[in-house]
Image (cartoon, rainbow, N blue to C red):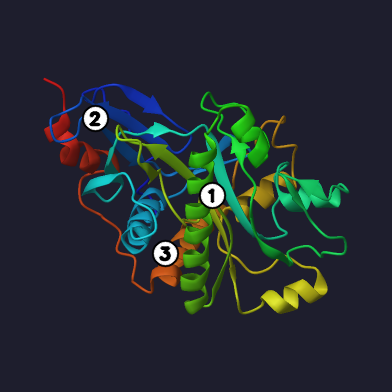
Protein backbone atom coordinates (compact mmCIF):
# COMPACT_ATOMS: atom_id res chain seq x y z
CA UNK A 1 0.00 0.00 0.00
CA UNK A 2 3.03 2.29 -0.06
CA UNK A 3 3.38 2.37 -3.86
CA UNK A 4 1.58 5.52 -4.98
CA UNK A 5 1.70 7.55 -8.18
CA UNK A 6 0.51 10.98 -7.00
CA UNK A 7 1.62 12.61 -10.26
CA UNK A 8 3.54 11.82 -13.44
CA UNK A 9 5.35 15.00 -14.39
CA UNK A 10 7.89 13.87 -16.99
CA UNK A 11 9.77 16.80 -18.57
CA UNK A 12 11.13 14.66 -21.41
CA UNK A 13 7.61 14.23 -22.79
CA UNK A 14 6.20 17.00 -25.00
CA UNK A 15 3.16 19.25 -24.69
CA UNK A 16 1.98 18.48 -21.15
CA UNK A 17 -1.58 18.85 -19.90
CA UNK A 18 -2.40 18.01 -16.30
CA UNK A 19 -5.98 17.14 -15.41
CA UNK A 20 -7.63 16.28 -12.13
CA UNK A 21 -6.61 12.64 -12.32
CA UNK A 22 -4.58 12.16 -15.51
CA UNK A 23 -1.29 13.67 -16.56
CA UNK A 24 -1.24 13.89 -20.35
CA UNK A 25 1.27 14.62 -23.09
CA UNK A 26 0.66 15.20 -26.79
CA UNK A 27 2.85 13.59 -29.44
CA UNK A 28 3.08 15.18 -32.90
CA UNK A 29 1.15 13.84 -35.89
CA UNK A 30 2.52 10.97 -37.97
CA UNK A 31 1.51 9.49 -41.30
CA UNK A 32 -0.19 6.63 -39.45
CA UNK A 33 -1.92 8.90 -36.92
CA UNK A 34 -2.40 12.33 -38.50
CA UNK A 35 -4.38 13.55 -35.48
CA UNK A 36 -1.37 12.97 -33.28
CA UNK A 37 -1.25 10.75 -30.23
CA UNK A 38 -1.96 11.54 -26.61
CA UNK A 39 -0.23 9.86 -23.68
CA UNK A 40 -2.68 9.54 -20.79
CA UNK A 41 -1.13 8.55 -17.48
CA UNK A 42 -3.63 7.67 -14.77
CA UNK A 43 -2.28 8.92 -11.47
CA UNK A 44 -3.55 7.73 -8.10
CA UNK A 45 -5.23 11.06 -7.37
CA UNK A 46 -8.90 10.93 -6.40
CA UNK A 47 -11.15 13.83 -7.37
CA UNK A 48 -14.58 14.93 -6.20
CA UNK A 49 -16.38 18.26 -5.89
CA UNK A 50 -14.07 19.49 -8.69
CA UNK A 51 -11.13 19.14 -6.27
CA UNK A 52 -8.30 16.71 -5.52
CA UNK A 53 -8.93 14.91 -2.23
CA UNK A 54 -6.08 12.39 -1.86
CA UNK A 55 -3.88 9.79 -3.60
CA UNK A 56 -5.04 6.16 -3.44
CA UNK A 57 -2.51 3.32 -3.98
CA UNK A 58 -3.08 1.34 -7.23
CA UNK A 59 -6.11 3.44 -8.19
CA UNK A 60 -4.55 4.54 -11.48
CA UNK A 61 -3.76 0.99 -12.50
CA UNK A 62 -7.26 -0.16 -11.58
CA UNK A 63 -8.81 2.59 -13.70
CA UNK A 64 -6.57 1.95 -16.70
CA UNK A 65 -7.03 -1.81 -16.68
CA UNK A 66 -10.75 -1.66 -15.96
CA UNK A 67 -11.33 0.85 -18.76
CA UNK A 68 -9.35 -1.47 -21.03
CA UNK A 69 -11.62 -4.35 -20.03
CA UNK A 70 -14.72 -2.33 -20.92
CA UNK A 71 -13.28 -0.85 -24.12
CA UNK A 72 -12.62 -4.39 -25.34
CA UNK A 73 -16.27 -5.28 -24.72
CA UNK A 74 -18.03 -2.23 -26.15
CA UNK A 75 -16.18 -1.55 -29.39
CA UNK A 76 -19.11 -2.86 -31.40
CA UNK A 77 -21.28 -0.04 -30.00
CA UNK A 78 -18.81 2.82 -30.21
CA UNK A 79 -15.18 3.05 -31.27
CA UNK A 80 -12.63 4.44 -28.83
CA UNK A 81 -9.37 6.36 -28.86
CA UNK A 82 -7.05 3.54 -27.72
CA UNK A 83 -3.91 2.77 -29.73
CA UNK A 84 -1.69 0.98 -27.17
CA UNK A 85 -1.10 0.22 -23.49
CA UNK A 86 2.65 0.61 -22.84
CA UNK A 87 2.27 0.55 -19.04
CA UNK A 88 -0.24 -0.56 -16.43
CA UNK A 89 -1.15 3.09 -15.80
CA UNK A 90 -0.81 4.41 -19.35
CA UNK A 91 -2.88 4.59 -22.51
CA UNK A 92 -1.63 5.86 -25.85
CA UNK A 93 -4.69 7.21 -27.58
CA UNK A 94 -5.59 8.95 -30.79
CA UNK A 95 -5.75 12.68 -30.10
CA UNK A 96 -9.37 13.73 -30.42
CA UNK A 97 -11.21 17.02 -30.46
CA UNK A 98 -13.20 16.59 -27.25
CA UNK A 99 -16.86 17.49 -27.55
CA UNK A 100 -17.73 20.33 -25.13
CA UNK A 101 -20.51 18.35 -23.47
CA UNK A 102 -20.11 15.77 -20.74
CA UNK A 103 -22.65 12.99 -21.17
CA UNK A 104 -24.00 11.63 -17.89
CA UNK A 105 -26.44 8.73 -18.04
CA UNK A 106 -28.52 7.94 -14.96
CA UNK A 107 -30.69 4.95 -14.22
CA UNK A 108 -31.55 5.79 -10.61
CA UNK A 109 -32.55 8.78 -8.48
CA UNK A 110 -29.15 9.04 -6.82
CA UNK A 111 -26.14 11.26 -6.27
CA UNK A 112 -24.60 13.70 -3.81
CA UNK A 113 -23.33 16.57 -5.96
CA UNK A 114 -25.15 19.80 -6.64
CA UNK A 115 -26.03 18.69 -10.18
CA UNK A 116 -27.24 15.18 -9.31
CA UNK A 117 -30.87 14.32 -9.98
CA UNK A 118 -31.41 13.31 -6.33
CA UNK A 119 -30.15 16.66 -5.04
CA UNK A 120 -32.32 18.59 -7.49
CA UNK A 121 -35.33 16.34 -6.85
CA UNK A 122 -35.10 16.84 -3.08
CA UNK A 123 -35.04 20.60 -3.73
CA UNK A 124 -38.46 20.19 -5.31
CA UNK A 125 -37.46 20.23 -8.94
CA UNK A 126 -39.29 17.86 -11.26
CA UNK A 127 -38.10 19.27 -14.59
CA UNK A 128 -34.36 18.90 -15.06
CA UNK A 129 -32.02 18.42 -18.00
CA UNK A 130 -35.02 18.45 -20.34
CA UNK A 131 -36.75 15.57 -18.54
CA UNK A 132 -39.81 15.54 -16.30
CA UNK A 133 -39.66 13.17 -13.34
CA UNK A 134 -42.80 11.99 -11.55
CA UNK A 135 -43.65 12.83 -7.96
CA UNK A 136 -43.26 10.20 -5.27
CA UNK A 137 -39.86 8.77 -6.14
CA UNK A 138 -37.77 7.61 -3.20
CA UNK A 139 -34.05 8.16 -2.71
CA UNK A 140 -32.08 5.68 -4.85
CA UNK A 141 -35.16 4.35 -6.64
CA UNK A 142 -34.87 3.26 -10.27
CA UNK A 143 -36.01 5.92 -12.72
CA UNK A 144 -38.81 5.02 -15.15
CA UNK A 145 -36.09 4.78 -17.80
CA UNK A 146 -32.44 5.72 -18.13
CA UNK A 147 -31.98 9.41 -18.93
CA UNK A 148 -29.11 11.57 -20.13
CA UNK A 149 -28.30 14.55 -17.92
CA UNK A 150 -25.65 16.46 -19.90
CA UNK A 151 -23.47 19.18 -18.49
CA UNK A 152 -21.07 21.69 -19.97
CA UNK A 153 -17.48 20.47 -20.06
CA UNK A 154 -15.39 22.75 -17.85
CA UNK A 155 -11.99 22.48 -19.56
CA UNK A 156 -10.36 25.15 -17.35
CA UNK A 157 -11.17 23.56 -13.99
CA UNK A 158 -14.45 25.42 -13.55
CA UNK A 159 -17.76 23.89 -12.57
CA UNK A 160 -19.86 21.87 -15.02
CA UNK A 161 -23.29 23.39 -15.67
CA UNK A 162 -26.54 21.49 -16.44
CA UNK A 163 -27.79 21.50 -20.04
CA UNK A 164 -30.76 20.21 -22.01
CA UNK A 165 -30.59 18.60 -25.43
CA UNK A 166 -32.29 21.66 -26.93
CA UNK A 167 -29.76 24.01 -25.31
CA UNK A 168 -26.84 21.92 -26.57
CA UNK A 169 -28.01 22.26 -30.17
CA UNK A 170 -29.21 25.87 -29.84
CA UNK A 171 -25.87 26.99 -28.38
CA UNK A 172 -23.99 25.23 -31.15
CA UNK A 173 -22.14 22.93 -28.76
CA UNK A 174 -23.14 19.96 -30.95
CA UNK A 175 -25.05 19.69 -34.18
CA UNK A 176 -28.39 17.89 -34.09
CA UNK A 177 -26.79 14.93 -35.91
CA UNK A 178 -23.94 14.80 -33.40
CA UNK A 179 -26.34 14.95 -30.46
CA UNK A 180 -28.49 12.19 -31.93
CA UNK A 181 -25.45 9.96 -32.43
CA UNK A 182 -23.88 10.71 -29.06
CA UNK A 183 -27.10 10.20 -27.12
CA UNK A 184 -27.92 6.94 -28.90
CA UNK A 185 -24.42 5.56 -28.30
CA UNK A 186 -24.42 6.67 -24.67
CA UNK A 187 -27.73 4.95 -23.93
CA UNK A 188 -26.59 1.80 -25.74
CA UNK A 189 -23.30 1.74 -23.82
CA UNK A 190 -25.14 2.23 -20.55
CA UNK A 191 -27.56 -0.58 -21.35
CA UNK A 192 -24.62 -2.89 -22.16
CA UNK A 193 -22.92 -1.85 -18.94
CA UNK A 194 -26.02 -2.43 -16.83
CA UNK A 195 -26.62 -5.86 -18.36
CA UNK A 196 -23.03 -7.01 -17.85
CA UNK A 197 -22.93 -5.59 -14.32
CA UNK A 198 -26.14 -7.42 -13.43
CA UNK A 199 -24.49 -10.69 -14.45
CA UNK A 200 -21.89 -10.00 -11.76
CA UNK A 201 -24.45 -9.11 -9.08
CA UNK A 202 -23.94 -5.37 -9.53
CA UNK A 203 -26.07 -2.36 -10.42
CA UNK A 204 -24.58 0.25 -12.74
CA UNK A 205 -26.38 3.27 -11.30
CA UNK A 206 -25.03 6.11 -13.41
CA UNK A 207 -21.96 6.97 -15.43
CA UNK A 208 -20.36 9.70 -17.48
CA UNK A 209 -18.89 9.45 -20.96
CA UNK A 210 -16.49 11.75 -22.75
CA UNK A 211 -16.74 11.75 -26.52
CA UNK A 212 -14.50 13.31 -29.13
CA UNK A 213 -14.08 13.42 -32.89
CA UNK A 214 -11.13 12.40 -35.06
CA UNK A 215 -10.05 14.16 -38.25
CA UNK A 216 -12.70 12.28 -40.23
CA UNK A 217 -15.46 13.42 -37.91
CA UNK A 218 -15.98 10.00 -36.33
CA UNK A 219 -17.34 10.16 -32.80
CA UNK A 220 -15.24 8.05 -30.42
CA UNK A 221 -15.07 7.52 -26.68
CA UNK A 222 -12.07 9.02 -24.91
CA UNK A 223 -10.83 8.92 -21.34
CA UNK A 224 -12.42 5.92 -19.59
CA UNK A 225 -15.60 3.89 -19.42
CA UNK A 226 -17.58 2.29 -16.58
CA UNK A 227 -14.83 2.66 -13.98
CA UNK A 228 -15.45 3.46 -10.30
CA UNK A 229 -14.25 7.00 -11.01
CA UNK A 230 -16.69 7.63 -13.85
CA UNK A 231 -19.55 5.48 -12.56
CA UNK A 232 -21.57 4.63 -9.51
CA UNK A 233 -22.06 0.95 -8.75
CA UNK A 234 -24.23 -0.65 -6.10
CA UNK A 235 -24.21 -4.25 -4.93
CA UNK A 236 -27.42 -5.97 -5.94
CA UNK A 237 -27.40 -7.96 -2.72
CA UNK A 238 -28.67 -5.48 -0.17
CA UNK A 239 -30.14 -2.92 -2.55
CA UNK A 240 -33.81 -3.73 -1.90
CA UNK A 241 -33.32 -3.64 1.87
CA UNK A 242 -31.57 -0.27 1.61
CA UNK A 243 -34.36 1.09 -0.58
CA UNK A 244 -36.97 0.00 1.97
CA UNK A 245 -35.28 1.59 4.97
CA UNK A 246 -33.96 4.64 3.17
CA UNK A 247 -30.28 3.89 3.76
CA UNK A 248 -27.39 4.20 1.32
CA UNK A 249 -27.15 1.08 -0.86
CA UNK A 250 -23.95 -0.96 -0.46
CA UNK A 251 -21.47 0.24 -3.03
CA UNK A 252 -17.87 0.52 -4.14
CA UNK A 253 -17.21 3.93 -5.56
CA UNK A 254 -15.64 7.18 -4.49
CA UNK A 255 -18.77 8.10 -2.55
CA UNK A 256 -16.90 6.55 0.39
CA UNK A 257 -14.48 9.46 0.59
CA UNK A 258 -16.92 11.96 -0.89
CA UNK A 259 -19.46 11.23 1.84
CA UNK A 260 -16.78 11.47 4.56
CA UNK A 261 -15.61 14.86 3.29
CA UNK A 262 -19.14 16.14 2.71
CA UNK A 263 -20.09 15.35 6.31
CA UNK A 264 -17.22 17.48 7.65
CA UNK A 265 -17.19 20.62 5.51
CA UNK A 266 -18.69 22.44 2.57
CA UNK A 267 -16.43 20.73 0.01
CA UNK A 268 -17.06 23.35 -2.67
CA UNK A 269 -15.78 26.21 -0.51
CA UNK A 270 -14.05 25.03 2.69
CA UNK A 271 -10.54 23.56 3.02
CA UNK A 272 -10.58 19.78 2.66
CA UNK A 273 -9.75 18.04 5.95
CA UNK A 274 -6.87 15.56 5.90
CA UNK A 275 -8.08 12.10 4.91
CA UNK A 276 -7.13 9.50 7.56
CA UNK A 277 -4.61 6.83 6.52
CA UNK A 278 -7.04 4.04 7.29
CA UNK A 279 -9.58 5.54 4.89
CA UNK A 280 -6.90 5.82 2.19
CA UNK A 281 -6.15 2.10 2.58
CA UNK A 282 -9.84 1.22 2.74
CA UNK A 283 -10.46 3.13 -0.48
CA UNK A 284 -7.57 1.35 -2.20
CA UNK A 285 -9.14 -1.96 -1.28
CA UNK A 286 -12.49 -0.72 -2.56
CA UNK A 287 -10.98 0.02 -5.99
CA UNK A 288 -9.29 -3.38 -6.12
CA UNK A 289 -12.50 -5.12 -5.05
CA UNK A 290 -14.39 -3.17 -7.70
CA UNK A 291 -12.01 -4.37 -10.41
CA UNK A 292 -12.37 -7.98 -9.32
CA UNK A 293 -16.15 -7.79 -8.89
CA UNK A 294 -16.75 -6.17 -12.28
CA UNK A 295 -14.34 -8.30 -14.31
CA UNK A 296 -14.37 -11.55 -12.40
CA UNK A 297 -10.57 -11.50 -12.65
CA UNK A 298 -7.87 -11.21 -9.98
CA UNK A 299 -6.22 -7.80 -9.77
CA UNK A 300 -2.46 -8.12 -10.19
CA UNK A 301 -0.60 -4.96 -9.12
CA UNK A 302 2.40 -4.04 -11.22
CA UNK A 303 5.23 -3.99 -8.67
CA UNK A 304 8.04 -3.56 -11.21
CA UNK A 305 10.37 -0.59 -11.04
CA UNK A 306 11.85 1.11 -8.02
CA UNK A 307 8.74 3.30 -7.85
CA UNK A 308 5.59 3.54 -9.99
CA UNK A 309 6.92 6.74 -11.55
CA UNK A 310 10.25 5.09 -12.38
CA UNK A 311 8.40 2.24 -14.07
CA UNK A 312 6.22 4.62 -16.07
CA UNK A 313 9.24 6.66 -17.13
CA UNK A 314 11.06 3.53 -18.32
CA UNK A 315 8.08 2.32 -20.33
CA UNK A 316 7.58 5.73 -21.93
CA UNK A 317 11.26 6.37 -22.69
CA UNK A 318 10.77 5.59 -26.41
CA UNK A 319 8.51 8.66 -26.60
CA UNK A 320 10.95 11.10 -24.99
CA UNK A 321 11.82 14.14 -27.05
CA UNK A 322 15.38 14.41 -28.34
The residue carrying mark 1 is 183
Residue 114: mark: none
The residue carrying mark 2 is 36
The answer to whether 52 is drawn above or below residue 229 in the figure is: above
Asked whether the viewer can see residue 53, the reply is no
Q: Secondary structure at mark 2?
A: loop
- Indicate the position of residue 124 as horizontal and vertical percent values: 88, 49
In the image: residue 121, left or right of residue 145 = right
Q: Earlier in the sequence, mark 1 or mark 2?
A: 2
In the image: residue 248, left or right of residue 316 = right
Q: Are marks 3 and 1 in contact (CB under 8 Å)?
A: no
- Indicate the position of residue 70 as horizontal and vertical percent values: 38, 60
The answer to whether 55 is drawn above or below residue 33 in the figure is: below
Disc 3/disc 1 C-alpha distance (Å)? 27 Å
Q: Residue at x 71, y 42 (%)?
A: 115
In the image: residue 213, left or right of residue 317 = right
Q: Observer-nearest residue: 179 or 313?
A: 179
Q: Residue at x 34, y 72 (%)?
A: 297
Quadrant assignment, res 68: bottom left
Disc 3/disc 2 C-alpha distance (Å)? 31 Å
Which of labels 3 and 2 is toward the front? 2
The answer to whether 86 is drawn above or below residue 250 in the figure is: above
Which of labels 1 and 2 is toward the front? 1
Q: Alpha-carbon neighbours of circle 2 within 10 Å: few (<14), some, or many (≥20)?
A: some
- Indicate the position of residue 72 as horizontal and vertical percent values: 31, 60
Quadrant assignment, res 267: top right
Q: Earlier in the sequence, mark 3 or mark 1?
A: 1
Q: Residue at x 76, y 45 (%)?
A: 128
Q: Alpha-carbon neighbours of circle 3 within 10 Å: few (<14), some, or many (≥20)?
A: many
Amino acid sequence: MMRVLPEARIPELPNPYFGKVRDCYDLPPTVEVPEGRRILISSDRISAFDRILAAIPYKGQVLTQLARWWFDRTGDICGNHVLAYPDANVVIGKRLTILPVEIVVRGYLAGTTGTSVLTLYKQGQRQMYGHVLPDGLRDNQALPQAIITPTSKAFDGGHDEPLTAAEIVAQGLLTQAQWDEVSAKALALFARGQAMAAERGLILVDTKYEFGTDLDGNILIADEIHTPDSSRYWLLDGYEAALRDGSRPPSFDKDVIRSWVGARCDPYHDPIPEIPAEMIEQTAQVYIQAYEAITGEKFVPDQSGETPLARVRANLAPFFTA
